[in-house]
Structures are given as C-alpha cells and as structure tokens.
Image: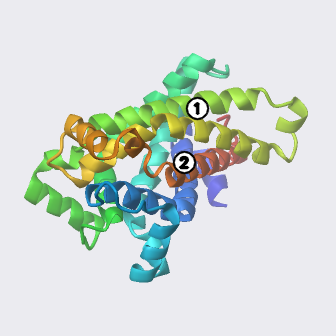
Amino acid sequence: MFIREVEFSAPPVIKAFMCGSLSGTCSTLLFQPLDLVKTRLQTLQSSVQPGWVRVGMLTVILSVVRTERLLGLWRGVSPSFARTIPGVGLYFSTYYSLKQHFFQDNQPGATAAVLLGGGARAVAGIFMLPVTVIKTRFECGRYRYRSVAGALRSVYQTEGPAALFSGLMVTLLRDVPFSGVYVMFYSQTKASLPKEVSSSSAAPLANFSCGIVAGVLASLITQPADVVKTQVQVNPQLRTAEAITYIYREHGLQGFFRGAVPRSLRRTMMASMAWTVYEKMMIHIGLKS
C-alpha cells in the first residue's frame, strides 16, 4: 500500500532515494560484522610490532565474541545505519539523476559507467564523511562514544570541525574508483547475459552473481586506499602521506592489503545485494534503474 501511494505522489528521484535507502539498510544489517573485523585488522597495525604472530580474521572474530559477546560484532551498526541509509539513498538517487540527464533510456558504455558510478559516489561520500569518521572510530574499539550524535558533538568540540572530514581525499580515492569500476564491471557483465536469463525469474540471482564479480575486482583495486583511510581517521594526527609512509615502513607492501578478505567479502556482498534490491524495487514501482 505504501509503495502504491509513493508511485503516484513522489518524484522519480525520491523513489530512487527510497529504494536505495532500503537496499542499504538490508545490506548493512547483514554484513556489519565483516566491516568491524576489517577495521580491527587494519588498526592492529598501529599496535602490533613486526615479528609478532600475524593476527587473522578468525582470531579477531573470536576475540570480539569472547570480550564483547556476539552482539559485539555489530558494534558500530548505529553509525553504519546513519551513514548508509541516507548515503546509499543519496548515491542511487544521484546515479539515477545523472543517468536520466545524460543517457535517458540508453545504456551507458564502459567509460560512461565509470563516470556515472564515480560521480554519484563522490557526492554521497562528501556529504556522509563525518558519519563515516564516527563509524570507523566506533568499530576500531578505541573510542567509547555513547551515540552517533554524541560522537559528532565530541569530535567537533575537542578536535574541531576539520576532524570530521579527516581522510577526505583518501576516502574519495578509495570510494570513487571503487564505485566507478564496480558500475562498469557490473553493467558490462549484466549486458553479456543471455536475454533468456535476464528476462527470466532467475534474473535477480544472475544480477547478484554479476555484482559479486564486479565487487571482487573493485575491492582489490581500491584496498590500499581503504587501509590508509582507516589509519587517518583513527589517528587524526596523521596526514595521508604520513600514514602511507608509516604503513610501508612498519609492514611493507602487504600492510596495504591488511583486512582485504573481510573488506572484499563485505563490499562485494553489500554492493551486490544493494544493487539487486534497488533494481527489484525500481521495477516494482515502475521505474527503469
């Protein structure tokens, strides 16, 4: 009933925002533990000395469950929701607006898909960066904020407004290429599907599989930028260049790929689910995604 009412009363860009927000909610709730594990693995670089036994994904999971219980794996889910519900909605509504403005009903090529995905992510990333900073701090376990609003207020008062935008450049260097590469691979793999598959009841599963392929490739390409971003946001005194130097000096090139497995799993599954749910919802309310 609610969707029927929206279909008649809301502008298309608002419908795209709502579909994106719903898809972001579902994917965030399911895959938040992977994001927490990724953040913990990356921030361990600041305290683990070279030569110590390497800490892996399973070790971090067991440690969190043992010390913070099972729900500890969802630590930081509040700022994640505060970031993804409006952020994913803003991303998809911007993507929809750009696509309709420049391409209307035509399918963009590979280069255009990169620009569409990257442009939409740049807009969403800049607007949602303060919440992203808070989310990273919640997940790392070093900060004991009581709420998202309280954390934003605390950072603003004690560190200044600039701290809420720490890691802006490296975040854009991570997210814009990821989204651009993801949309390119996703659209190209979808276009290569046989028509009998894309028009059948198996289309959502096929699209989800295309999203997994695109997500793995995009995640690996942008992993180093994610490691640097985490270090800058958890340690505000570090500049981007200093964080890069520190990671390389202490851990070598492999340090830039720490947390790659949980991040690739999370980003791939989240993006695949978000796009699948978004496209299904857009079809349901009568819009072409």
Q: Position of residue 227 (x, y in %)?
A: 37, 45
Residue located 33% across and 59% down the image: 44
Disc 2 crowd rating (10 Å Cα; few below 14, some 14-19, many 20+) is many
Residue 233 vertical position relative to residue 171 in the rendered view, above or below: below
| Amino acid on which the number 2 mark rests in the picture | Ser
Quadrant in the rendering for residue 55: bottom left
Residue located 62% across and 59% down the image: 2
Q: Name the residue carrying label 1.
A: 183
- On screen, residue 85 versus residue 173, left or right, reads right
Q: Secondary structure at mark 2?
A: helix
Q: Would you say the residues marked 1 and 2 are in contact, meaning their CB atoms lie under 8 Å apart?
A: no
Q: Is residue 62 visible?
A: yes
Q: Secondary structure at mark 1?
A: helix
Q: Furthest-right residue in view?
A: 196
Q: Name the residue carrying label 2.
A: 264
1 or 93, nearer to the observer: 93
80 or 258, nearer to the observer: 258
Q: Is residue 97 visible?
A: no
262 or 173, nearer to the observer: 262
- On screen, residue 92 versus residue 133, left or right, reads right
Q: Earlier in the sequence, mark 1 or mark 2?
A: 1
As measured in the structure, the alpha-carbon distance from the residue carrying label 1 to the one carrying label 2 is 16 Å
Instruction: Please state, as top left, top right, bottom left or bottom right, where the N terminus lies in the image.
Output: bottom right
Residue located 27% across and 38% down the image: 244
| Amino acid on which the number 1 mark rests in the picture | Val
The colour scheme of the drawn protein is rainbow
